[in-house]
Image (cartoon, coloured by chain):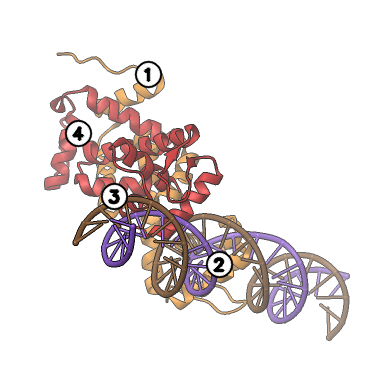
Chain colours: A orange, B red, C purple, D brown
Amino acid sequence: MEDYLEAVEMLRSKGRPVRINEISKLLGVKMPSVTAAMKRLSKEGMVIYERYGSIKLTPAGEKAARDVFRRHEILRRFLIDVLDMDPEKAAEDACRMEHAISTTALERLAKLQNLVQSCPEDRIPWLTSYRRYLEHGELPEHTD
Amino acid sequence: MEDYLEAVEMLRSKGRPVRINEISKLLGVKMPSVTAAMKRLSKEGMVIYERYGSIKLTPAGEKAARDVFRRHEILRRFLIDVLDMDPEKAAEDACRMEHAISTTALERLAKLQNLVQSCPEDRIPWLTSYRRYLEHGELPEHTD
DNA sequence: CATAAATGTTAGTCCGGCCTAACATTCTCC
DNA sequence: GGAGAATGTTAGGCCGGACTAACATTTATG
């Protein structure tokens, strides 16, 4: 369900029509699945949806969607900026993990992200060694 | 299913009886669910299971179980050693994320872990600032 | 050793989430 | 405006994974 909310928000924010068909394509799922999901989300007060119409988020839905999206982004940024993953793969991974990670872990990842962002690349020797390690398999020497 | 495999391996490795009841308690699930799971895993060639008997892993099952366990451990260690999470919460989180994370991300986390382990605590200033940031909310100054 | 307790199984249900097939509505364009 | 295309819905099925209730087996104990 979270994925559906996220998809709705994503289409909206991109100015694309928020319709069953679009969501279906975006999520790689058939239309009847989307219809069913919209019914559920509508019953849960997350979206406003009428047959054949286009879909809107309620305030609650928007909140939830933004939350999921934030999870997604934090994870994705971590996978890219820290673990140095391929952006596309990172997005896929984030998509799966965003439903499993706890708030605590998420907030901590976010802070790690802040830290990384707040420094110019070369001011984080640890991250640099990590990158080197990833690439060449060399663990750094202890200089002591 | 992965959780069931993991549970079997865990009980075995702790020398506890590997029985429906035990798995049920370990996973917080009722016995019939366990029976059903064992039937499936048996059909998939992962466990050897006969009615009222105790459960064993096949070689394939053992491999799979070890793999899940490794995921769990890498995630758990990351959550504890890097994100500085409460061990108990870390274990719970690991339990949920272990099914969602990709091999790529996992291997990179493992390497991060190696790096952290290979250094004495105080040789990782980044991690130290991170901890400080977590605790007091101070982003470190750039000294340049 | 017999019976009660503990453990395990079966049968049947529910729910979420996906699908296909068939049908309905809306859109587009002549 | 009407016909065909595009889009959307309904109905019905399947699967995984959980549950309860009822029954079966095994174990432990008086």
Q: Which residue is mark 4?
A: B127
The residue drawn where x is 35% and y is 41% is A78
Tell me which amino acid carries mark 1: Gly
User: Crowding near pointer 2: few (<14 within 10 Å), some, many (20+)?
Assistant: many
Tell me which amino acid carries mark 2: Val
Tell me which amino acid carries mark 3: Glu
Residue reaching furthest left?
B136
- Tell whether A51 sits left or right of A85: right
The residue drawn where x is 31% and y is 37% is B73
Confirm or deny contact between disc 3 and disc 4 (CB under 8 A).
no
User: Crowding near pointer 1: few (<14 within 10 Å), some, many (20+)?
Assistant: few
* Distance in Å between CA atoms under marks 1 and 3: 31 Å
Indicate whether A104 appears above or below B106: below
Quarter-wise, where is residue D25 in the image?
A: bottom left
**For residue A18, which numbered disc appears in the image?**
2
Label 3 vs 4, first from the N-terminus? 3
Instruction: Please state the chain letter of the residue tagged with numbered disc 1 in the rendered image.
Output: A
Q: Does label 3 lie on the same chain as label 2?
A: no
**For residue B92, which numbered disc appears in the image?**
3
User: Crowding near pointer 4: few (<14 within 10 Å), some, many (20+)?
Assistant: many
Confirm or deny contact between disc 2 and disc 3 (CB under 8 A).
no
- Tell whether D8 sits left or right of B1: right
Q: Which residue is mark 1?
A: A137
Tell me which amino acid carries mark 4: Leu
